[in-house]
Amino acid sequence: MIQGKLPQEDCTKLVPAPRSIKDAGTVLLIDAAEALSLMTPRRDRQSIILTQMRMLNSGMLQNIAPEAIVAPLITADYDIVDLGILLEDLGYAGDLYALTRPLPRAELVIREVGAACPRLTVRLLEIG
């Protein structure tokens, strides 16, 4: 491993290799019913809960205890940064998948959302 001379706090934190959304036991889909085709719901393997952003609260997140959350990158009412900030305020610190069509510079989106929501592990879930 090559180590630079920058102080450690100036470096981007390392994130474990991404696991597949199919590996998550409980997935919360927020305004993202189109992501159902990417899931593998089975009582013994994966639970899928559908909701809307306006229904989110800390009690819901504590009861569901999602291993992953999927939501659209952009909607008419909010974007993934707005949702990420709300999720952090509600106490969630886990995987957040932004549902989107393939993007030419996906790493820029991930970096921007990750900077605004440092307690979340942000990934893109590309469809279409």
Image: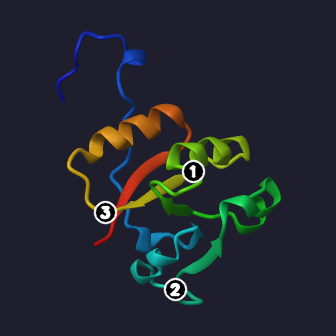
Is mark 2 in CB contact (under 8 Å) with mark 1? Answer: no
Residue 61: x %, y % from top left: 73, 60
Task: Give the foreground label among 2 and 1.
Answer: 1
Q: Could you tell me which residue is drawn at 72 percent across and 59 percent down?
A: 54
Helix, strand or loop at disc 3?
Answer: loop
Residue at image location 35% in from the left, 56% down from the top:
18
Q: Position of residue 71 (x, y in %)?
A: 52, 61
50 lies above or below 67: below
In the picture as drawn, the residue positioned furthest to the right comes out as 59
In this rendering, is residue 81 above or below 32? above
Q: Which residue is mark 3?
A: 101
The residue at which mark 1 appears reads as 78
Tag 1's secondary structure?
loop
For badge 3, the amino acid type reads: Arg
Who's the residue at 45% across and 79% down the image? 39
| Residue 15 position in % (x across, y down) | 38, 42
Give the spatial CA distance, label 3 vs label 2: 23 Å
Closer to the eye: label 3 or 2:
3
Quarter containing the N terminus: top left
**Mark sitting on residue 41:** 2
The alpha-carbon separation of the residues under discs 1 and 3 comes to 17 Å
- Left or right of 12: which side holds 48? right
Of the numbered discs 2 and 1, the one sitting upstream in the chain is 2
Q: Position of residue 53 (x, y in %)?
A: 67, 60
117 on left or right of 4: right
Amino acid at circle 1: Tyr
Measure the alpha-carbon separation of dots 2 and 1: 27 Å
